[in-house]
Image (cartoon, rainbow, N blue to C red):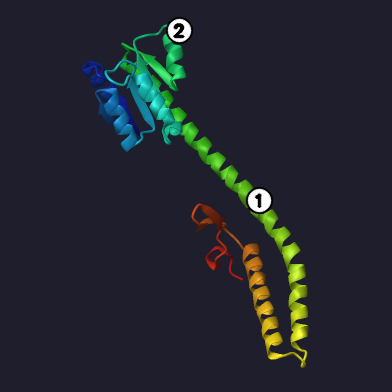
Amino acid sequence: MRVLFADDDVIARTLLAAVLADLDHDVTIADNGEAAWESFQRDPAPLVVLDINMPGLDGLEVCRRIRGHDAGRETFVLIVTARDGRDDLVSVLEAGADDYVTKPSSPENLRARLEIAKRRIAQDTARRAAEAELARSRWLAGIGETTIALEHEINNPLSALLGHAELLMMDKGLTEDQYEQLHIIQEQAARIAQVVRRLAKLKNPQSVEYLAGSMMIDLSSRTSRSD
């Protein structure tokens, strides 16, 4: 897993970097908060470990900025702090951190906190995937209900329109212009019927851009089942 780790203390960096490497994580190391924030903006990591005290931007400010970033919701932030007073820990949680670890800390304790973070990230990823699948299932169900309603509400009057147009076109007394107008009505009604049939045969509805900022369901033949 990719991990962004920031600490201005070279000894602390060396210790945690060794633990992360031992756990086979792909580690990016920053020696201050500004460098950590710049690194996250370039390539957001799923796990970010931040020392609370760093020059420039401290760990809490970097955490707040991560939470305001588009990818911040999916990032697990672990704060490393030497302060374990109630007010200090409240500040850590209010900044948006998911967990914290106090230092100095043993390699075993660091491994335990990192394992918790790894499991939480996996659980959150699975939850987001399940929520996305549920949302798509509901969307597809809505498309199906809409399709049935459209078929019923459009096909009946459309069939009547086509039938009457065909009967009128059989009238030998029609002028050429009248015949042409009826032919246009018949053609356009047939086009509507084709759209309704494609809508009924959608097997994997997809949204496509219609106009700038406007989306519509793709009713092209590639999204429909073959007859």
Say left or right for 61 vs 207: left
The disc, 1 or 2, on the residue closer to the chain's N-terminal end is 2
Visible residue check, residue 160:
yes
- At x 24%, y 16%, the residue is 9
Q: Secondary structure at mark 2?
A: helix
Q: Which residue is mark 2?
A: 86
Q: Is residue 116 above or below residue 143?
A: above
- The residue at which mark 1 appears reads as 141
Residue type at numbered disc 1: Ala
Circle 2 residues within 10 Å: few <14, some 14–19, many ≥20: few
Q: Disc 2 residue type? A: Arg
In which image quadrant can residue 51 be found? top left
| Vertical comparison of 50 with 182: above or below | above
Q: Nearer the viewer, residue 87 or 20?
A: 87
Residue extending furthest toward the bottom: 172
Q: Position of residue 56 (x, y in %)?
A: 28, 20
Residue at the (32%, 29%) spot, across then down: 37
Residue 177, image x, y percentages: 68, 87
Given the current orientation, which residue lies at the most extreme left position?
10
